[in-house]
Image (cartoon, rainbow, N blue to C red):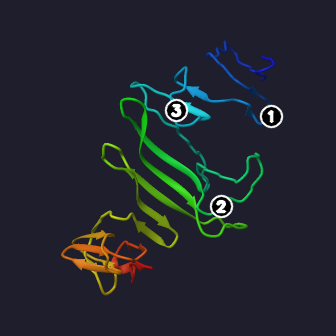
């Protein structure tokens, strides 16, 4: 098979049947690259994405489950990876350093609201701190949308290398009681509520209130931590 838009060599002992194929660019040999192409759509004849223009779109119906599987068959310490990469350049192959506070990628969960897709939950990776050679520190934000007539994007949790931060006005319920002397959650039921004006932690019944303290580290157990507070 050899044409101006599709090139290759196919060898088979029987009949080779190709499904309907429409390309807006060209498939070249060697590394099997696809260049100058728009959206590859699987399972439908048109795109159902209105928020942005994807490079790959998968559609399925009730007889199948949508998904992408990556299998690694290897007896060494090698396994599938999923990379989200971001460079501050419009030129492919130019690794201009990104800026601090710049987003590097999102994983978004959406549901149909009767009209189109609406965001429900997403995880966002953001560069933070000093960006330099072999150094791109980052944080993860977990966002939920509220149950309201106009749903509000709410940051509920932020993970940093130094600990975690709970979203303002939210309550974190843990399985444990707070030890004010050591800052360790030990037994029974407890809550952290970062709405109080009290500096640091205070215990109110079974509730823990978080005031001006910037972040909280929650240890797995009292045995492996001496201090659960991180300023």
Separation of disc 2 and disc 3 at Cα? 28 Å
Which residue sits at x=62%, y=63%?
100
Crowd rating for badge 3 (residues with CA inside 10 Å; few <14, some 14–19, many 20+): few
Residue at the extreme top: 15
In terms of secondary structure, where does tag 2 sit? loop
Separation of disc 1 and disc 2 at Cα? 35 Å
Crowd rating for badge 1 (residues with CA inside 10 Å; few <14, some 14–19, many 20+): few
Is 184 on the left-hand or right-hand side of 129? Answer: left
The disc label shown at residue 30, or none: 1
In terms of secondary structure, where does tag 1 sit? loop
Give percent across and percent down for residue 111: 39, 37
Which residue sits at x=35%, y=44%?
150
Name the residue tied to disc 3: 50
Which residue sits at x=66%, y=19%?
22
Give percent across and percent down for residue 48: 50, 28
Instruction: Work out which quarter of the rendered image holds the N terminus and state it.
Output: top right
Give percent across and percent down for residue 152: 38, 50
Residue at the extreme bottom: 181
Name the residue tied to disc 2: 99
Instruction: Work out which quarter of the rendered image holds the C terminus and state it.
Output: bottom left
In this view, 122 is above or below 118:
below
In this view, the mark in front (3 or 1)? 3
């Amino acid at each position: 098979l050899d044409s101006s838009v599709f090139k290759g060599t196919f060898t088979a002992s029987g009949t080779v049947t190709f499904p309907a194929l429409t390309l807006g660019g060209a498939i070249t040999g060697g590394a099997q690259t696809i260049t100058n192409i728009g959206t590859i759509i699987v399972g439908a004849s048109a795109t159902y994405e209105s928020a942005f223009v994807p490079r790959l779109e998968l559609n399925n119906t009730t007889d199948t489950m949508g998904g992408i599987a990556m299998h690694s068959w290897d007896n060494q310490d090698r396994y599938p990876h999923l990379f989200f990469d971001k460079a501050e350049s419009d030129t492919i192959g130019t690794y201009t350093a990104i800026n601090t506070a710049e987003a590097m990628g999102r994983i978004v969960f959406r549901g149909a609201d009767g009209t189109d897709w609406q965001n429900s939950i997403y995880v966002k990776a953001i560069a933070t701190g000093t960006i330099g050679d072999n150094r791109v520190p980052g944080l993860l934000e977990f966002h939920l949308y509220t149950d309201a007539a106009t749903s509000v994007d709410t940051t509920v949790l932020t993970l940093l290398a130094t600990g975690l931060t709970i979203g303002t006005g939210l309550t974190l319920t843990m399985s444990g009681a707070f030890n004010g002397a050591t800052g360790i959650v030990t037994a029974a039921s407890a809550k952290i509520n970062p709405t109080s004006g009290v500096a640091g932690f205070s215990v109110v019944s079974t509730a823990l209130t978080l005031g001006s303290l910037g972040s909280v580290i929650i240890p797995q157990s009292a045995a492996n931590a001496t201090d659960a507070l991180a300023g």
